[in-house]
Image (cartoon, helix red, strand yellow):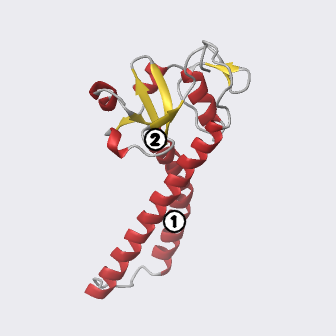
């Protein structure tokens, strides 16, 4: 298991990753929505907007909750995709300072290269990774999250397990 300090220092890059993807996605969608709403304002400047009924509000809230659930499911799916990709390199060599998933990587090079495959750029060292994420409780970790230890980093697989570049003897 992990010690309390390790748990406190757990960083979830998965969340950052998804937020970054979400920001890019939302910039595109928001840009389009803004243009549409500006057109709508020009067309219907005198239209009066009534407050929504209780039924309409409940319907809207239910729809928003459903969208949030779908978002969470999509995030979990991306995290699992990261785990699945990372696990195919189990058994490859550990090379201090390395970033090659096939010829050898150290712990942070492994994590950086796995995430790079998904278009996500992470810092090079475990220390930099630790200070650039969002900390969460270990009990809230999801597959694809980055787990930081003192001088080490790995990717959370689920079930209290990580995939990582460990040592020269174990790979």
Q: Nearer the viewer, mark 2 or mark 1?
A: 2
- Quadrant (top left, top right, bottom left, bottom right) of the C terminus: top right
What residue would you read off at disc 2?
16
For the image, the number of numbered tags is 2
Q: Is residue 58 left or right of residue 93?
A: left
Image position of 164 with respect to 21: above or below: above
Image position of 44 with respect to 104: above or below: below
Q: Secondary structure at mark 1?
A: helix
Q: Residue furthest right?
A: 103
Q: Earlier in the sequence, mark 2 or mark 1?
A: 2
Q: Is residue 94 visible?
A: yes
Image position of 19 with respect to 28: above or below: above
Answer yes or no: do the residues labelled 2 and 1 have beta carbons within 8 Å?
no
Image position of 99 with respect to 63: above or below: above
Q: Quadrant of residue 148?
A: top left
Q: Is residue 9 left or right of residue 93?
A: left
Q: Residue at x 57, y 42 (%)?
A: 83
* Residue situated in front as seen by the camera: 66 or 158: 158
User: Is disc 2 surrounded by few (<14), some (14 to 19) or many (20+) residues within 10 Å?
Assistant: some
Q: Is residue 124 left or right of residue 139?
A: right
What residue would you read off at disc 1?
33
Q: Quadrant of residue 121?
A: top right
């Amino acid at each position: 298991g992990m010690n309390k300090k390790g748990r406190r220092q757990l960083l979830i890059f998965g969340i950052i990753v998804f937020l970054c993807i979400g920001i890019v996605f939302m910039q595109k969608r928001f840009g389009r929505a803004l243009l549409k709403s500006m057109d709508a304002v020009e067309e219907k400047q005198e239209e009066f907007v009534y407050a929504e009924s209780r039924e309409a509000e409940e319907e809207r809230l239910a729809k928003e909750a459903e969208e949030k659930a779908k978002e969470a499911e999509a995030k979990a799916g991306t995290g699992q995709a990261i785990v699945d990709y990372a696990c195919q390199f189990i058994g490859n060599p550990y090379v201090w300072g390395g970033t090659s998933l096939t010829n050898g990587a150290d712990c942070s090079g492994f994590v950086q290269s796995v995430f790079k495959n998904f278009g996500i750029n992470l810092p090079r060292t475990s220390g930099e990774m630790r200070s650039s994420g969002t900390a969460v409780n270990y009990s809230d970790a999801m597959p694809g999250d980055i787990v930081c230890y003192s001088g080490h980093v790995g990717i959370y697989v689920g079930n209290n397990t990580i995939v990582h570049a460990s040592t020269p003897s174990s790979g």
